[in-house]
Structures are given as structure tokens and as C-alpha cells.
């Protein structure tokens, strides 16, 4: 649709007081950030809710970061900024590099790496206070009730979503949704469970090791098998 | 409002030559010319008033001028001499004004403000004329006005050595003058003449939008001058060096607590911000100096983006003061701009998704980087390296680059970039014995399964826990690519070798049996810098960990480098 036809398609009432066309298109769906997967978006109500704290729990290799990356991209596509407060300092840059998005390039994606995990919550609060980010992911924090209440209030005021990434489920008090990740190495399948005040939904998908290598590399193995003691 | 003075030496090249010869003649009394060029190509570059009245015009051939006036006195064009003379005169004029700058050949801008308690503008004029006379230029003309354009125009009028334009009357003064008193190009003068506009007042009466549409940027500037508006580009403050943007305060008594210091600091910032706003400028960096009983303490402050927002500057100063260890009580403070830049506004796009507020981003960035340093707020960027941990880099966020909306770097996701781990490069490293892996988005990719494959795969296995508290509410989805996470430094790992290969690994103090293993993938390279040789394995444990470990034959040990998540 050309610009002129897009404008003519909008009534004056719709335009309101100089509302951007993209905002009009987004409409009420902007109350949640879509995850970019129809199954997950159906399991969560339209995606990750804004203005709330969502717990993102699961052990190592359960697929938490994979879905988070998908979510960040989805948020950026709407033009909103996203931030990841990485208290573990284990995030690697390459998977998060983003190509051109629209005529203006990609919206900001900041990774905040405080020197100590204790800096995660202050950094998250600072990002919320700026009001510049639609999604803030915080990992490595020690979640207690008081900071969660404060962050929840800030999230509600700014309309941003907060995802608290933890290893064990139930670590984030007052979380609106609890998304739990797990994997089964035998069947190489992954499972995402979503809990919301008694409601329980589940999404599963199969995965394999990243890539296969031949068992015989063609070179002799120099290591000597450990002798039984 | 500040007052601007312009001092002009009429027929400056001739006056300069006469001054160099210590001659006593006035340029207006004898036919004199300055010639530029040689031989037949020589033309008249300057002529005294009497020469001009005798028919000599600027630009005419020197031979023709000589033919008209056989006794004509002439000199060769000498830029070096004019520069020396002008420098010398500027130094003399400093006796009248603390701020003197050049306003073209033979003309100077002077700051005429601050004479209220020293006799007013009359005293200033007297001082400036005395200085010019002392330098040997009794014919100097002086114009004083609110704007530089009016002051300069005043010096271009014949008949009066001093033109003092009352404050607020610049436009009225200019209205009746011909257009050439403004510094505008010949082309614009011709264009305005063609439109029937001959005086400055007629130009001022034009509608601003029309002027912009028809006459362009130069027309807009001339229109502003004609209306008595100052654009800040000229005058004694136009070329003001950045270091001159400063504000300082001396405390009535020694201060020990931060609150009163911040109170006075705010008033300083207010003053500086107002001065910057008047010139349409913003601070890009500044130095905060606290004078204490034991000497000055200084801290450089650089906002995330140029700003003159006092609240933000005050926050930055507060943070800086917390880091600044004062050895004694504070006696005064000074804020000095290290760099000022013009304020710019960003044009939004109706059809582009809304962008975060730049001021909000600046606030967040300033606070976070102020707390933990620039490396604490980063963004991902592609990098080309064979070494796994260098395949990509964190770049400190710079707000200006965020705001100019440059697209992400090439070689990024979806453009063939990402990890170069799997690319053999001569001289950088090599990998052996492996087929090309499947890479997507900079991470090893889970082999993509179609939704049908997934469903059939799940159906063939016993589905685990698909039933929830509310009944059958489960679904299957396409798998997202797993993301590699790395320790900042590979961690030593205890590995139990079974049948010549890893059989169990010690993760977080817990021995976990290896469920499946892929490898070795041998990586080596960078012999010229920090040689590495690693034999990587992808280890899947019975507890679900998907680890990336390597054996280092040089150190004869196992290391845990990261995991997929």
C-alpha cells in the first residue's frame, strides 16, 4: 500500500491527534509482545504481557535463551527497543547481531553487563525508568518481593514487559505468568509449560544437537584412555 | 541583550599601505589604488574615494586607471601585509573591548557590553576610536547595535564615523538602507533587484515562508538580518571558542556538604544553559572544577548525547561529585565546556514504527555508563575471527550512532555473517576432518524439522506430560535455534574418560553421565598472537545439559567453554 492510499484509508477519527500509522496498525495487540511462534502466542495470551513481570525458568540448555532471542526480534520488529541485563555475563554477541530492519535500521537492543550480579536489579530499574524500552530481560538477579513490586509498578507505568530469567521455577514472587522450560535428552524434545493462576498450558517441540560430526575425524586420537585405578 | 560593535577601516588595503609607509595622507584625499595581478592582467583591487570619484572602478584594468590619472599612486596587492596590519590593530582594540574578532578585511567585531558602570556606550566608543587612532586609523567607522548585521551595516554608511543604534531599533534603522549594506551575494542582490526589492525594509516585509521557498538559505539569512534578528553566526560571540562557554561561582564561605554545593551548581548550569540556548548550542562535554582549600579538583563529564538540559546535567554532576574526593572544604566551582555543538532535532516519520525517545535513552545510558563505565552497556556487532569467543563483539553503546539510525552492520544475521568458526581461512586457522556444518544466525542450528516432522516425531515418542490441570491444552511448535552461551573464560572441567572418550563430566560439582557426544572438532590458529589448539566436543548429558567442552593438548586438560540454551 502506498503512503497516500494508506493515509486515505484512515479516517480522521482514527488518526486522532497525530498518531503514527504504525501505532494504529499495532492497535490493542500491543498489550503483549508476540513471541513469533503461533503456538506460544496462543499459550500465552497474545504473547508476553506488557506491564507485568513474567518468570522465565528452566535449567541450563532448556531453550530459554532461544525463545528469548525470538522474542527480542519480534519486539524490535514493532519498532520498540529491548534490553537484556546479563548478570551472568555469559551472553555471546554473535547470535544477537541484527540485520537491517526497515528504512531506519533496527531499534536499539542494549545488553547491560553489570560487573556484579547485584547490579542487575538497579540496572533493570534504570532501564524501566527511562521508558525507552518495551522489553527488559533480567538474568542473574536475586529476586525478592520488594524489588519485584517496584519493578512491577515501573513496568505498569511504562507499559513495558519484564522477563525475569531464573534456573528454578517459583523464584520470582508476584510474577504474572510463569514460563517453565525443560528438555529431555533421550527424546531430544523440549517442553515449555505456562502457568497463570492455576491455568496450565504446554507446548512441546523436538530438537536435535546443533550439528552432527563424523565419529571418525580421520586423525588418531592422542589421548590415552584413563586406566582403571 | 548584549551589544555588538563593528569597527571598519574604509579602503582598508590603501590604509594599510599608507600605515606601513608611516604616511600621513588620508586615503580619501589622493587618488590611490591597489593593483592585483601582473602586466596586462593587472586589475584595480582597491581605490581611494577620490580615485573612485574620478572614474576608477574596482575590477577595471590597471593600465586604463593609469591612463585616466597619470599621477595615480599605486601599490601591489599584499595579503601578508594586510594580515599583519589587521593583527596589530586587533591587539590595539583589546584596550577597548575584551573580545575582538575579525569581521573581514579591515573590519572587527567588538563586544560592546559591560560598559554600564564605566561610562556607558559613549565611553566604549571613545575608547574604541582612541585605540584606532593610536594605531594610525583616524578614519575608522564604528557601528553599535543589538545585532551584528545592523552594526556592520552602520559602518558601511558614509558621512558619520559613529552610528549608535538604539537597542530594539535595528530593524527600523535598516529599513531605509539599500540592500548592499547587508553581506549578501551579488546573485541574491540581482535577484532581489529583479523582484523590485531595493531596500532592507522591503526585504523584511516579505513573508518568511515565501522567502525560504524562493530565495533559499541565503535569502532566509538575509531576511532575518533585515528583520533585526541575530542568527548567532557572526559577531564577537560567533567564533567563540568552546572553552569560553563557562560559568563559575565563588561561595560566600567554605562549604562542607553536597546539598548547598548542588544548589549553587544548579544556578551555574542554569546560566550556562541559557547562554547556550541563546546560540542554539548544546554541551557535548564539560569539566567540573571544585576549588577547595587544598587546591582544585576536576572531573570531566560527557553526556551520552549533546544536551543543555539542566536536570540531566545536574544528575551527571551529582554522580561526578560522588566520585570526586575533595581534600578540603569547597570554596567555589567552575563549569567549563570542552565541546559545544549545534542543537539538532530529529525528523520523525509517520509511517515508520515509533522510536524510543532520545532523551530517555540518553538518560538511561548516562546513568548506567556513569555507574559502571562505557563497557557496561553494549550492543552486539559482528566480528570475523576463527576463535570461537571472538566471533562477535560487544560494542559500547554510543547514543549518537543509535539516533542517526544507521542500519546494523553488514555481515550480520541473515546476511551471511555470524560466527566464522566454521570457515577455514589460510593464515588464521584451520579445521580438520569435518563436513560443513549447518549454521544459522550465528549459532549452530538445530536441523529444521517441518511441523509435520515434529508432530510425527512427537507422536512416535511418548509425549511427556502434555496433560495439564485444565485438560488437554498442549501444542507443538517449530523449534527455535538454540543460542550458544559462553563463559568469559573457559573453565577447567573434570572429565571421566570411558572407552577413550568422555563418559561423564563434572558440572557444578555433580558428575553427569554423557548421553551423546559429537566430536572432536579441532580448531587451531592465531599462532602469531595467542596460539590456540582445541578439540571441541558437544556433550549432551543425561540431565539435559548441552555443553561445549574442549580438550587442550598443549595444556593437557579439559575445559568447559559454554553451552547451548
Image (cartoon, rainbow, N blue to C red):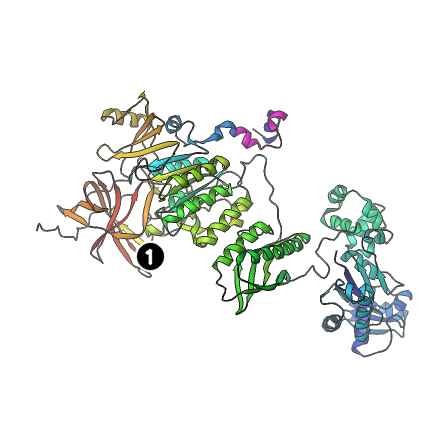
Q: Where is residue B65 in the image (x, y as percent from the top left)?
A: 86, 68
The reply, left or right, for residue B83 in relation to residue B517 is right
Name the residue at the left extreme.
A229
Which one is nearer the viewer's eye here, B195 or B223? B223
- Chain name for mark 1: B
Q: Where is residue B456 shown, x and y percent of the image?
A: 27, 25
Outermost residue toward the top? Answer: B471
Q: Is mark 1 on a helix, strand or loop?
A: loop
- State the quadrant of the N terminus of chain B: bottom right
Residue on which disc 1 sits: B427
When the figure is inspected, residue B8 is found, relative to residue A57, above or below; the finding is: below
* Image point (62%, 48%), residue name: B344
Q: Within the magenta stretch, is there residue A15?
A: yes
Q: In the image, B330: left or right of B387?
A: right
Residue B232 falls in which quadrant of the image?
A: bottom right
Picture residue at 49% right of the left edge, 66% below the top: B327
Which part of the image, by quadrant, shows the C terminus of chain B?
A: top left
Task: Give the residues in magenta.
Answer: A10-25
The one of B165 and A93 positioned closer to us in this rendering:
B165
Label 1, residues with CA under 10 Å away: few <14, some 14-19, many ≥20? few
**Residue B478: quadrant of the picture:** top left
Q: Which residue lies furthest to the bottom in this view?
A: B22
Q: Is residue B469 shown to the viewer in this render?
A: yes
Residue B329 in the image: x percent, y percent?
53, 65
Using the rendered view, name the quadrant where residue B440 is placed: top left
Q: Is residue B22 left or right of residue A140?
A: right
Above-or-below relation of A15 to B337: above
Q: Position of residue B259 (x, y in %)?
A: 55, 55
Residue A11 visible in this rendered orientation of the protein: no
Labels in figure, total: 1
Amino acid at each position: 500500500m502506498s503512503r497516500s492510499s494508506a493515509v486515505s484509508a484512515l479516517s480522521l477519527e482514527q488518526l486522532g491527534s497525530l498518531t503514527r500509522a504504525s501505532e494504529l496498525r499495532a492497535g490493542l495487540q500491543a498489550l503483549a509482545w508476540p513471541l513469533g511462534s503461533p503456538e506460544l502466542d496462543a499459550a500465552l495470551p497474545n504473547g508476553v504481557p506488557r506491564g507485568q513481570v513474567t518468570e522465565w525458568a528452566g535449567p541450563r540448555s532448556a531453550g530459554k535463551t532461544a525463545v528469548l532471542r525470538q522474542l527480542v526480534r519480534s519486539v524490535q520488529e514493532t519498532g520498540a527497543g529491548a534490553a537484556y541485563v546479563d548478570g551472568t555475563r555469559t551472553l555471546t554477541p554473535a547470535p544477537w547481531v541484527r540485520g537491517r530492519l526497515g528504512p531506519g535500521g533496527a531499534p536499539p537492543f542494549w545488553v547491560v553487563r553489570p560487573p556484579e550480579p547485584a547490579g542487575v536489579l538497579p540496572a533493570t530499574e534504570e532501564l524501566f525508568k527511562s521508558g525507552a524500552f518495551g522489553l527488559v530481560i533480567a538474568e542473574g538477579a536475586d529476586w525478592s518481593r520488594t524489588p519485584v513490586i517496584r519493578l512491577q509498578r515501573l513496568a505498569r507505568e511504562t507499559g513495558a514487559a519484564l522477563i525475569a530469567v531464573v534456573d528454578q521455577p517459583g523464584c520470582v514472587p508476584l510474577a504474572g505468568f510463569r514460563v517453565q522450560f525443560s528438555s529431555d535428552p533421550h527424546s531430544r524434545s523440549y517442553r515449555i509449560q505456562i502457568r497463570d493462576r492455576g491455568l496450565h498450558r504446554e507446548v512441546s517441540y523436538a530438537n536435535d544437537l546443533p550439528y552432527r560430526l563424523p565419529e571418525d575425524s580421520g586423525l588418531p586420537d592422542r589421548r590415552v584412555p584413563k586406566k582403571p585405578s | 541583550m548584549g551589544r555588538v560593535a563593528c569597527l571598519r577601516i574604509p579602503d582598508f588595503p590603501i590604509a594599510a599601505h599608507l600605515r606601513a609607509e608611516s604616511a600621513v595622507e588620508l586615503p580619501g584625499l589622493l587618488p590611490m589604488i591597489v593593483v592585483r595581478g601582473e602586466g596586462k592582467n593587472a586589475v584595480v583591487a582597491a581605490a581611494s574615494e577620490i580615485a573612485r570619484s574620478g572614474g576608477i572602478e574596482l575590477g577595471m584594468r590597471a593600465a586604463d586607471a593609469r591612463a585616466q590619472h597619470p599621477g595615480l599612486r599605486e601599490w601591489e596587492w599584499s595579503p601578508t601585509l594586510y594580515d599583519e596590519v589587521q593583527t596589530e590593530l586587533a591587539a590595539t582594540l583589546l584596550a577597548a573591548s575584551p573580545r575582538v574578532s575579525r569581521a573581514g578585511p579591515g573590519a572587527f567585531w567588538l563586544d560592546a557590553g559591560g560598559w554600564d558602570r564605566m561610562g556607558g556606550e559613549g565611553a566604549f566608543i571613545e575608547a574604541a576610536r582612541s585605540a584606532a587612532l593610536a594605531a594610525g586609523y583616524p578614519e575608522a567607522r564604528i557601528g553599535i547595535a543589538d545585532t551584528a548585521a545592523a552594526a556592520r551595516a552602520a559602518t558601511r554608511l558614509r558621512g558619520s564615523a559613529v552610528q549608535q543604534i538604539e537597542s530594539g531599533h535595528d530593524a527600523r534603522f535598516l529599513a531605509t538602507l539599500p540592500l548592499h549594506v547587508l553581506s549578501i551575494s551579488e546573485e541574491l542582490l540581482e535577484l532581489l533587484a529583479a523582484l523590485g526589492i531595493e531596500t532592507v525594509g522591503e526585504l523584511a516585509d516579505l513573508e518568511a515562508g515565501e522567502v525560504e521557498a524562493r530565495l533559499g538559505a541565503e535569502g532566509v539569512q538575509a531576511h532575518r538580518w533585515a528583520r533585526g534578528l541575530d542568527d548567532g553566526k557572526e559577531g564577537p560571540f560567533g567564533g567563540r571558542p568552546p572553552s569560553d562557554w563557562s560559568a563559575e561561582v565563588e561561595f560566600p564561605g567554605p562549604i562542607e556538604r553536597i546539598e548547598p554545593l548542588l544548589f549553587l551548581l544548579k544556578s551555574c548550569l542554569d546560566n550556562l544553559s541559557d547562554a547556550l540556548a541563546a546560540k542554539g548550542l548544546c554541551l557535548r562535554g564539560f569539566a567540573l572544577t571544585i576549588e577547595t582549600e587544598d587546591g582544585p579538583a576536576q572531573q570531566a563529564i560527557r553526556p551520552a548525547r549533546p544536551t543543555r538540559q539542566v536536570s540531566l546535567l545536574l544528575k551527571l554532576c551529582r554522580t561526578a561529585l560522588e566520585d570526586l574526593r575533595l581534600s578540603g572544604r569547597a570554596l567555589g566551582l567552575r563549569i567549563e565546556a570542552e565541546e559545544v555543538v549545534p542543537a539538532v532535532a530529529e525528523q520523525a516519520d509517520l509511517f515508520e514504527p515509533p522510536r524510543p525517545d532520545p532523551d530517555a535513552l540518553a538518560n538511561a545510558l548516562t546513568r548506567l555508563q556513569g555507574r559502571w563505565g562505557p563497557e557496561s552497556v553494549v550492543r552486539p556487532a559482528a566480528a570475523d575471527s576463527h576463535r570461537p569467543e571472538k566471533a562477535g563483539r560487544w560494542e559500547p553503546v554510543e547514543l549518537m550512532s543509535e539516533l542517526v539510525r544507521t542500519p546494523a552492520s553488514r555481515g550480520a544475521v541473515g546476511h551471511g555473517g555470524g560466527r566464522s568458526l566454521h570457515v577455514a581461512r589460510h593464515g588464521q586457522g584451520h579445521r580438520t576432518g569435518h563436513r560443513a556444518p549447518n549454521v544459522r544466525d550465528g549459532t549452530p542450528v538445530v536441523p529444521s524439522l517441518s511441523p509435520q516432522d515434529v508432530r510425527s516425531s512427537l507422536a512416535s515418542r511418548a509425549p511427556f506430560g502434555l496433560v495439564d490441570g485444565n485438560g488437554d491444552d498442549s501444542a507443538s511448535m517449530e523449534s527455535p535455534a538454540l543460542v550458544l552461551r559462553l563463559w568469559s573464560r573457559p573453565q577447567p572441567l573434570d572429565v571421566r574418560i570411558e572407552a577413550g572418550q568422555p563418559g561423564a563430566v563434572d558440572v557444578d560439582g555433580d558428575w553427569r553421565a554423557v548421553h551423546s557426544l559429537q566430536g572432536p572438532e579441532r580448531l587451531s590458529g592465531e599462532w602469531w598472537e595467542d596460539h590456540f589448539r582445541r578439540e571441541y566436543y558437544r556433550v549432551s548429558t543425561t540431565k539435559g545439559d548441552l555443553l561445549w567442552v574442549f580438550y587442550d593438548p598443549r595444556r593437557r586438560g579439559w575445559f568447559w567453554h559454554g553451552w547451548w540454551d
